[in-house]
Amino acid sequence: MSAMAPAALEKLTGLVAATFTPFTTQGEINLSEIGPYIDYLTEKQGINSIFVNGTTGESMSLSVTERKILAEEWCKKAKGKMDQVIVHVGCMSLKDSQELASHAAQIGADAIAVIAPSFFKPSTADVLKTFLQEVALVAPTLPFYYYHIPAVTGVNVPVRDVLEDIEKLIPSFRGVKFSGSDLMDFGQCVSYSQPHWSVLYGMDEQLLAALAMGAHGAVGSTYNYAGCHVNKLILAFEKGDLVQARTIQFKMQELLSYATKLASLSLTGFDLGVNKQLMNELSGLCLGSPRLPVMPCPHAQALSIAQKYHSIFPEQ
């Protein structure tokens, strides 16, 4: 393999947890929780790959320096325990994204992912591909994923258009984290997908629909604390037991619907603050509160959602 050829990693499949960033009570990054966090994911949830410094990880609320420190710690502590660590390096600034991508290659990350910039937004697929290409160029040996999340970025360029001839621009391209609800666009991505790509779905509440469309795996925040159950959903689907797969999917929908309705009463919605506090309650880890402008979730509210979780999934 030449020095410029992308690494030949095993194709990314199954569940990937989008990790929360641990903070201290003073709001600083807390590296001491990362080792126990990884052990919790592997031992309690059956999760063997992680997506760090993404939306769930509050990447846009972190400095470049903080993101480097976190990425290095995640990679170091996951070595020998996790199959793959995908480091999200997307930023509003191309230069910052390039700096993070280059750093990810230096610290032994297994892959990188890039979100579309959302202040000055790319207006076409070609513009977006050019931005992604410029980031990928500085880390040509790392598998590269495009991270599509239009509800957050406001960038609604069809992903299928982004994929068109993308390996001519990015030879290291290996797939998409598709966090959108447009299953037609998603299906076209799967249909166009090359054998060595992974098309990963990111809307936890409708994973089963994406599996039926041919998703190779999934990246999500709820897999941090419900991965053991969703792994059973995937296994049931693969065995052709759609009744069991639907049963688990409906349970996840019941939990998220309950959390959304409860959170809406406090005007927060089921946002990152609620999700992070729920992870604290269910895992026993001390991940802290989110960073402003995301507001922390009231403890009583998270406790109620945790109790709902245990009533829906009494076996854990």
Image (cartoon, rainbow, N blue to C red):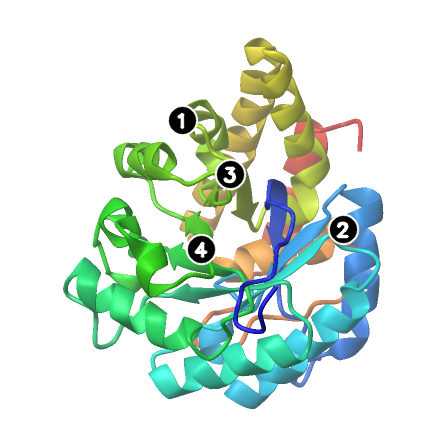
Of callouts 1 and 4, the N-terminal one: 1
Q: Which residue is mark 1?
A: 213
Q: Which residue is mark 2?
A: 41
> Residue 271 versus residue 106: which sits nearer the camera?
106
Of badges 4 and 3, nearer the viewer stands 3
> Circle 3: is it few (<14), some (14-19), or many (20+) Cα within 10 Å?
many
Give the residue at x 62% y 14%. Answer: 244
Q: Secondary structure at mark 3?
A: helix
Of badges 2 and 4, nearer the viewer stands 2
Give the residue at x 31% y 33%. Answer: 183
Q: Which residue is mark 4?
A: 266
Q: Label 3 amino acid? A: Leu
Choose top left, top right, bottom left or bottom right for residue 239.
top right
On screen, residue 162 versus residue 297, left or right, reads: left
- Quarter of the picture containing the C terminus is top right
Q: Which residue is mark 3?
A: 256
- Check if mark 1's residue and mark 4's residue have beta carbons within 8 Å: no
Give the residue at x 49% y 86%. Answer: 99
